[in-house]
C-alpha cells in the first residue's frame, strides 16, 4: 500500500478497488454492537487541521477510533501556529512525539506534500487549498459503487465551482482513472483555467446534461465567489445552475444526486432536490467513515485480512 | 601593486570588436596593453590558456537586501557572490527597508558597496515613495546625490497607475535615466501564485496569466513612445512580451530588455513539487516561453541577461507555497546557466552579460572596450567547464537556488575589479589580490 495519500495520483485503479473492497467489508462495524476493530491498537494518528472542518475531522476521528488507534486533534487556532510556528516546525514537533500518521488539512495547496518530505509518519491529505481532497473522492466512489457495479462508461456531471474545488479535482482524477466520463457544468468563470487539458466535457447547459448522466455531483457555492466577481449574484447562479426539483426531474430514473457538504440549500441545490430518494448525500457522510477506516487500515495496519483482524 | 599579465587567453571584447588570443597587461587599476605577445619580468603572470578573458559582467537586477534584511544578504555578501559570478558591477534594487526612495538610502547603499570593495554597486532608486505607486519619489535628489542614480524602478511592485507612470517617464528624462517597471497588471494577477495554465489548473494554485505581464509591457511601450523615455523591460518571461518588444524595436523605439537565467531554462512543471525554491516573480512559464526567450536573447530582441538575484532566508522560503516569498539567488550560477542553456556564441555571451548591460546603464568603466587605459574590470572564465553548485559553499548569505544538482557549464576562474583580483582560481581573495 502507498506510504502517503496526497493526491488521487498516488493510487492506481487496483489500489482504489482495494480500498473500496476493504471499506465494504469494514462497513458493517457501524451496525455491530461492539463498534471497534483492534487493528491499530497502539498506533497514534494526529488530525492536523489548519482549516476549520467538522465532518472530515469527525469522520477521520471516528474511523481511527473504530480501529482502536489513539487520536490527537490539533487545530491551528489556539496553538503554537498562532504564535508563528512554521508548518515544518509543527511537523517536526509532532514527529518527535512518535506519531504514526498525520491527517492534514491546510488552506495552502501542496502543504501535505511538503509536510510529507519532513516526517517519517504516513501523511493523508484531508484537503489542501484548491488542490485535492482524495479521501472525499474515495468515499464518493464508494457511494457510487453502492448503486452502479462498474465505473467504466459511468457518466458523471460535476456542477458548480470546479475552479476553486479540491473535491472536484480529486473526483475527476479518480473517476477518469476508473473509466468514467466526466462533464463539468457551470459558468466559465467557475471552470478551471485550461480545463481543456483535463480530458473532460465542458458545458454551461445543465438542462442538456441532466437527462444523459448517471450521477449529478453538485458543488458548494461560496458567498465569497460572488464578492470576488466570479458571479453576479447567488440568485442568478441558482436560477441558471441550481439543482431544484424541476431540474432533478430531468434525471434518469436511477441517477444519483450527490454533494460533498455542507450544502447551501436554495443556492446550488434546493431543499426538495436534496431530500429526494435518489439523493445519497447522507450516505456519503456515513460512507466517509468506512472509507477512511479502510485507508487507515491498509496504510497502517499491514496486509492481514479484515476477518483475521476482527477476530483477533 | 605589481603589474598583472593575463597570458594566452582568448580575449572576447565585443565593444572593441575583438575575439583573438592575446596577452593583457594590467598596471595599477587599468589596462596597460593588449597584444599577441607581451612579456614582463616582474609582472604577476596568470596563465589564461584555454580561458576567455572578457570585460567583467554587469548585473542590472540585483537584490542586496541591505538595509533591512541583513539576515538574507548584505551588500558585502552579495558583492562576494557577484565577484564569484564574474561580475564587476551590480545594480542594487530599491526594495530595501527602508526603501531606497531618497538620497540618504542610495548614498548609504553605495557607501556599503565601496566599503565591501568587490564590485561597483550602483543603487537603483525607487520610482514612487515607499514603492507604493502613489507619488513620485525624489528622483532628482537621488540623481544628483553622490550615488548618481541613473536607473529607477519600483522593482517587484508594478506602477499600476498609467498617469503616474507617464509622469515618472517624463521626469526621468531630465536625468537621462532608464526606468524599469515590473510588468504585472495588478487586478489580473491578484492572488496569483504561479503561471496560469495546465499546471496551475492541476495544482489548484491561482494563476497569473501571461497577459498580466503583456498588458503592462504594451502600456509602457506606448507610454515610452509618448514620453520619449528610455524604458527598460525587466525579467521578460513570456513569448507575448518578446513579440511586443520585437515589434517596438522594429519601429525604432529606444528600449531595452533583460531576461533572467532561470527564465531561460526552468518551466512551471517544476512547481509540481510545491517547493517554493521555484517560486519567483514573474513566475516560471512554459517550454514555449523558454524557447521564445532563448531566441530573443540570441537575436538581440532581449539585450541582456540580468540575474534578479533575490536572496531569502530558509525560514522565509521553506514554507507553504502561497506563504513563501518570490525569488531565487542567481549571481554565482548565472554564467553557468547561460553557457549551458542559452546557446550563445562567445561574442554574444559576453555582449549579453557585460557589454549590453553596461551600455544600457551608461557605465563607461564596465563592459569594455578593454583598450589601453580602460579600467581593468575583467572576468576570466572557462566556457566549457562542467560543474554543479554546492549550496553549502555559496557566498551569498541565502541558499534559495533552484540549480542545486543541475549540471552547469561555464565557470569563473578570475575576476579583476579595478585592477585587483577579487576572485582568483575561483576563490574570493579577501582583498589579498
Image: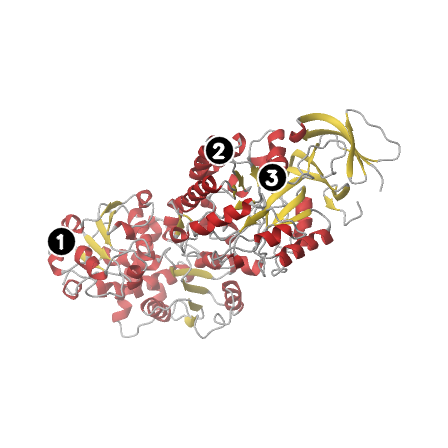
| Residue B409 in sight from this viewpoint | no
Identify the residue position indicated by label 2 in the image: B249
Q: Which of marks 1 and 2 is in front?
A: 2
Mark 2 Cα shell of 10 Å, populated few (<14), some (14-19), many (≥20): some
Distance of label 3 from label 2 (alpha carbons): 17 Å
- Numbered tag placed on residue A251 in the rendering: 1
| Residue A108 in sight from this viewpoint | yes
Residue B253 left/right relative to A148: right
Distance of label 1 from label 3 (alpha carbons): 66 Å
Write the residue at 82% across / 27% down: B38
Residue A141 left/right relative to B309: left
Q: Is residue B116 above or below residue B379?
A: below
Nearer to us in this view, B46 or B212: B212
Mark 3 Cα shell of 10 Å, populated few (<14), some (14-19), many (≥20): many
- Numbered tag placed on residue B393 in the rendering: none
Circle 2: element type: helix
Residue B204 left/right relative to B10: left
Identify the residue position indicated by label 3 in the image: B357
User: Disc 1: which chain?
Assistant: A
Farthest residue in the right direction?
B41
Residue A253 left/right relative to B313: left
Write the residue at 25% across / 70% down: A31
Dots 1, 3 in contact, CB < 8 A: no
Q: Which of marks 3 and 2 is in front?
A: 2
Amino acid at each position: 500500500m502507498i506510504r502517503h495519500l496526497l493526491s488521487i495520483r498516488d493510487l492506481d485503479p487496483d489500489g482504489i478497488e482495494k480500498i473500496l473492497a476493504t471499506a465494504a467489508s469494514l462497513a458493517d462495524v457501524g451496525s455491530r454492537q461492539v463498534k471497534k476493530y483492534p487493528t491499530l491498537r497502539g498506533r497514534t494518528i494526529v488530525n492536523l487541521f489548519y482549516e476549520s472542518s467538522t465532518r472530515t475531522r469527525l469522520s477521520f476521528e471516528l474511523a481511527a477510533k473504530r480501529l482502536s488507534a489513539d487520536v490527537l486533534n490539533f487545530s491551528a487556532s489556539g496553538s503554537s501556529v498562532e504564535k508563528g510556528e512554521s508548518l515544518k516546525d509543527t511537523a517536526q514537533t509532532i514527529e518527535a512525539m512518535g506519531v504514526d500518521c498525520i491527517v492534514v488539512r491546510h488552506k495552502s495547496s501542496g502543504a501535505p506534500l511538503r509536510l510529507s518530505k519532513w516526517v517519517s509518519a504516513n501523511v493523508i491529505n484531508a484537503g489542501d487549498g484548491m488542490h485535492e481532497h482524495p479521501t472525499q473522492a474515495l468515499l464518493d466512489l464508494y457511494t457510487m459503487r453502492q448503486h452502479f457495479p462498474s465505473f467504466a462508461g459511468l457518466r458523471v456531471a460535476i456542477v458548480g465551482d470546479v475552479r476553486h474545488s479540491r473535491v472536484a479535482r480529486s473526483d475527476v482524477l479518480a473517476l477518469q482513472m476508473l473509466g468514467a466520463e466526466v462533464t463539468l457544468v457551470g459558468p466559465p468563470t467557475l471552470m478551471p483555467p485550461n480545463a481543456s487539458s483535463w480530458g473532460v466535457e465542458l458545458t454551461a447547459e445543465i438542462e442538456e446534461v441532466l437527462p444523459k448522466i448517471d450521477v449529478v455531483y453538485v458543488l458548494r457555492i461560496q458567498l465569497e465567489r460572488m464578492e470576488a466577481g466570479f458571479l453576479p449574484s447567488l440568485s442568478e447562479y441558482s436560477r441558471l445552475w441550481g439543482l431544484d426539483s424541476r431540474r432533478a426531474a430531468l434525471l434518469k430514473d436511477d441517477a444519483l444526486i450527490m454533494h460533498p457538504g455542507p450544502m447551501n440549500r436554495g443556492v446550488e441545490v434546493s431543499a426538495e432536490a436534496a431530500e429526494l430518494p435518489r439523493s445519497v448525500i447522507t450516505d456519503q457522510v456515513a460512507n466517509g467513515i468506512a472509507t477512511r477506516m479502510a485507508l487507515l487500515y491498509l496504510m497502517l495496519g499491514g496486509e492481514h485480512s479484515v476477518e483475521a483482524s476482527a477476530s483477533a | 601593486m605589481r603589474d598583472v599579465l593575463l597570458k594566452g587567453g582568448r580575449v572576447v571584447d565585443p565593444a572593441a570588436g575583438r575575439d583573438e588570443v592575446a596577452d593583457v597587461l594590467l598596471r595599477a587599476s587599468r589596462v596597460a596593453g593588449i597584444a599577441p605577445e607581451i612579456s614582463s619580468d616582474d609582472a604577476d603572470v596568470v596563465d589564461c590558456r584555454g580561458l576567455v578573458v572578457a570585460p567583467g559582467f554587469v548585473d542590472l537586477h540585483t537584490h542586496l537586501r541591505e538595509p533591512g534584511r541583513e539576515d538574507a544578504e548584505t551588500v558585502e555578501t552579495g558583492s562576494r557572490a557577484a565577484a564569484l559570478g564574474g561580475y564587476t558591477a551590480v545594480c542594487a534594487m530599491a526594495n530595501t527597508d527602508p526603501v531606497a526612495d531618497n538620497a540618504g538610502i542610495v548614498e548609504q547603499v553605495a557607501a556599503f558597496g565601496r566599503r565591501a570593495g568587490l564590485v561597483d554597486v550602483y543603487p537603483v532608486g525607487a520610482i514612487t515613495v515607499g514603492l507604493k505607486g502613489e507619488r513620485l519619489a525624489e528622483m532628482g535628489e537621488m540623481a544628483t546625490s553622490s550615488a548618481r542614480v541613473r536607473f529607477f524602478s519600483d522593482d517587484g511592485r508594478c506602477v499600476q497607475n498609467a498617469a503616474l507612470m507617464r509622469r515618472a517617464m517624463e521626469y526621468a528624462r531630465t536625468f537621462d535615466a532608464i526606468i524599469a517597471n515590473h510588468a504585472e497588471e495588478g487586478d489580473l494577477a491578484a492572488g496569483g501564485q504561479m503561471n496560469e495554465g495546465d499546471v496551475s489548473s492541476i495544482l489548484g494554485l491561482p494563476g497569473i496569466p501571461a497577459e498580466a505581464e503583456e498588458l503592462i509591457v504594451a502600456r509602457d511601450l506606448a507610454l515610452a513612445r509618448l514620453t520619449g523615455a528610455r524604458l527598460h523591460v525587466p525579467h521578460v518571461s513570456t513569448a507575448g512580451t518578446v513579440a511586443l518588444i520585437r515589434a517596438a524595436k522594429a519601429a525604432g523605439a529606444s528600449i531595452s530588455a533583460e531576461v533572467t537565467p532561470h527564465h531561460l531554462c526552468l518551466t512551471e512543471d517544476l512547481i509540481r513539487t510545491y517547493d517554493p525554491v521555484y517560486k519567483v516573480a514573474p513566475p516560471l512559464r512554459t517550454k514555449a516561453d523558454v524557447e521564445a526567450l532563448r531566441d530573443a536573447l540570441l537575436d538581440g530582441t532581449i539585450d541582456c541577461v540580468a540575474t534578479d538575484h533575490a536572496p531569502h532566508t530558509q525560514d522565509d522560503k521553506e514554507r507553504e507555497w502561497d506563504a513563501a516569498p518570490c525569488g531565487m539567488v542567481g549571481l554565482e550560477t548565472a554564467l553557468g546557466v547561460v553557457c549551458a542553456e542559452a546557446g550563445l556564441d562567445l561574442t554574444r555571451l559576453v555582449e549579453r552579460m557585460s557589454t549590453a548591460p553596461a551600455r544600457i546603464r551608461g557605465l563607461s568603466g564596465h563592459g569594455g572596450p578593454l583598450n589601453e587605459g580602460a579600467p581593468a574590470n575583467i572576468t576570466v572564465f572557462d566556457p566549457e567547464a562542467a560543474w554543479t553548485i554546492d549550496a553549502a559553499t555559496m557566498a551569498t548569505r541565502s541558499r534559495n537556488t533552484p540549480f542545486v544538482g543541475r549540471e552547469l557549464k561555464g565557470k569563473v576562474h578570475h575576476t579583476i575589479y579595478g585592477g585587483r583580483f577579487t576572485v582568483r582560481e575561483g576563490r574570493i581573495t579577501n582583498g589579498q589580490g
